[in-house]
Image (cartoon, rainbow, N blue to C red):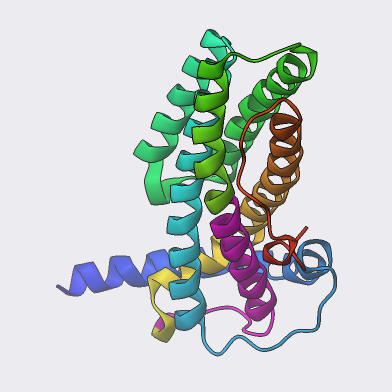
Amino acid sequence: MERRKLLKAMAMLSAAGYVSSSQAQFGSLVKSVTGGSENTGGGSWKSVAKAFAEAKTNFVSELVVQTNISADIAEALDLQSEAEAMRTEANKVEKEGDSLGSGDIGAVSEKSESTQKLISEKLASADALSDGQKAALGAAAAKYVPSLVRGVLTGKALKDIITNATSLGTPGFSDGMAAVSAAKDIPTLAPAMVNFLVNSVTTGKDLLTTMNSKGVATPDIDESDFAGFV
């Protein structure tokens, strides 16, 4: 038991050293990610760590949903290889779960951007879509809009987490390993998640507009859902 406590203490000291060197990043993060909003205070590292864990879980869930939706849209437009690639990415993300890192998000973003470009080009150049294509795209759009809205809620929570973390300094032993882990991950992972969600909203809204112009029935978008985020 004493050995276990010693190993835990050593791990926390090592992580705390890394976290301490990361603290300077928070100030610039607040300006770049939240637009320079004032620090509202973070309560405690335990509460920030809990909020971050919940936001990350929600992000992973929506990332899987949106990646699969992109696959459905690509398939409806006969972009079979792109559809398969996006489903492969969705499976990878689902397997990674809460261990998802900023590098994983970057890889999905790269695949998503190239696929979305092909989708947009295929839609824009289409003289007419078949009834089957319109039905498939409409079904995808019906899932897409709610996911975008949920993503905005997660993104706003992440912005608050970044802002709140700036006032807390380096977590100590009493805060626990979850807090130390959160303090280490927030400077790199939280902005990557926010940036992905911002881009997904921008791309998603443009894509839905193009779908609608081609006769696809898409849900109405309430701009108030995205106010203050994009």
- Bounds of the magenta segment: 148-173
Residue 4 visible in the snapshot: yes
Measuring from the top left, give residue 207's x and y in whole percent: 71, 34
| Nearer to me, 119 or 40 | 119
> How many numbered discs?
0
Which residue is depicted at the point 58% across and 48% down? 145
Quadrant where the C terminus is found in the figure: bottom right
Q: Quadrant of residue 73?
A: top right
Which residue is depicted at the point 60% across and 47% down? 219
Q: Is residue 193 above or below residue 186?
A: above
Which residue is depicted at the point 64% across and 15% down? 129
| Nearer to me, 30 or 91 | 91
Measuring from the top left, give residue 167's x and y in whole percent: 68, 85
Q: Quadrant of residue 229?
A: bottom right
| Nearer to me, 186 or 67 | 67
| Residue 163 in magenta stretch | yes
- Does the magenta stretch mainly form a helix, a strand or a loop? helix
In the visual, does 79 lie left or right of 194? left
In the visual, does 98 lie left or right of 3? right
